[in-house]
Amino acid sequence: DIQMTQSPSTLSASVGDRVTITCRASQSISMWLAWYQQKPGKAPRLLIYRASSLERGVPSRFSGSGSGTEFTLTISSLQPDDFATYYCQHYNDYWRSFGQGTKVEIK
Amino acid sequence: QLQLQESGPGLLKPSETLSLKCTVSGDSISSSRFYWGWIRQPPGKGPQWIGNIYYSGTTFYNPSLESRVAISADTSKNQLSLTLRSVTAADTAMYFCARSDISASYHYWGQGTLVTVSS
């Protein structure tokens, strides 16, 4: 099984900050990684797919990078609407799994 | 506009069988461009992938659930189904259905339905 390790688990930041979240795979997953944002009581919302492709309708302050085993989600300038929990999700053959999540809190 | 709506009983007793439906509108579940998945999320935890079903009817499941789970599709009703046998308290979660494509990401999600397992 491929293990996904997401860090940090919690992040305190202020509006306007640049924020980076990391997801590491235990073995190479090429570019088969997605990032989601989730707010309480809501379904996850896809932000980034295939490591770096921005989902339609997602603000350009969100970006993804990486390949192989290390991936990052960057929010260039944190906005009030961005305080949420973020998950990475990988794809391997026909199986998928999610990271443990990063909660972005107001500093 | 694509919409997915989960439905099913909200409360089960241990050892019972969980049966959920996902009604899809705005797209045909038999389209070869997309496939469909079930994901669950226990309270306060991250999402857990349950499995996918493809337009051909082929299914793939999370190995940790494979012995108890089945996903099927009813194209006449444009509906997906999830069955999970012998539930325990550990199966208490919000259950979501979602649509994926060649990107292997879930672009569209239902709002979810909460299932609680308690005696």
Image (cartoon, coloured by chain):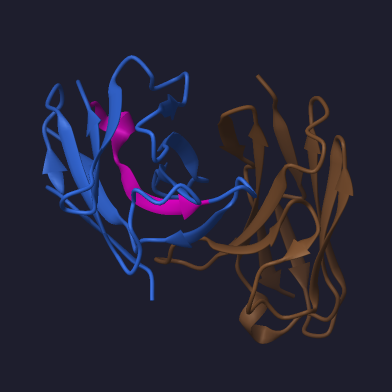
Chain colours: A brown, B blue
Q: Residue at x 77, y 84 (%)?
A: A15
Residue A71's spot in the image, x, y percent?
A: 84, 47
- Is residue B92 inside the magenta stretch? yes
In this rendering, the count of numbered labels is 0
Left or right, A35 with respect to B34, comes to right
Please identify the quadrant where the N terminus of chain A is shown: top right
Q: A93 or A59: nearer the eye?
A: A93
Residue A30's spot in the image, x, y percent?
A: 82, 36
Q: Residue at x 26, y 35 (%)?
A: B72
Please identify the quadrant where the C terminus of chain A is shown: bottom right
Q: B83 or B56: nearer the eye?
A: B56
Q: A4 or A60: nearer the eye?
A: A60
Q: Residue furthest top?
A: B67
Q: Is residue B105 above or below residue B2?
A: above
Q: Residue at x 86, y 76 (%)?
A: A76
Left or right, B53 with respect to B16, comes to right
Q: Residue at x 81, y 25 (%)?
A: A27
- Is residue B57 inside the magenta stretch? no
Q: A15 or B96: nearer the eye?
A: B96
Residue B4's spot in the image, x, y percent?
A: 32, 62
Q: Is residue B110 above or below residue B76?
A: below
Q: Is residue B31 above or below residue A46?
A: above
Q: Which residues are magenta?
A: B87-100
Residue B88's spot in the image, x, y percent?
A: 24, 26
Left or right, B22 with respect to A73, comes to left
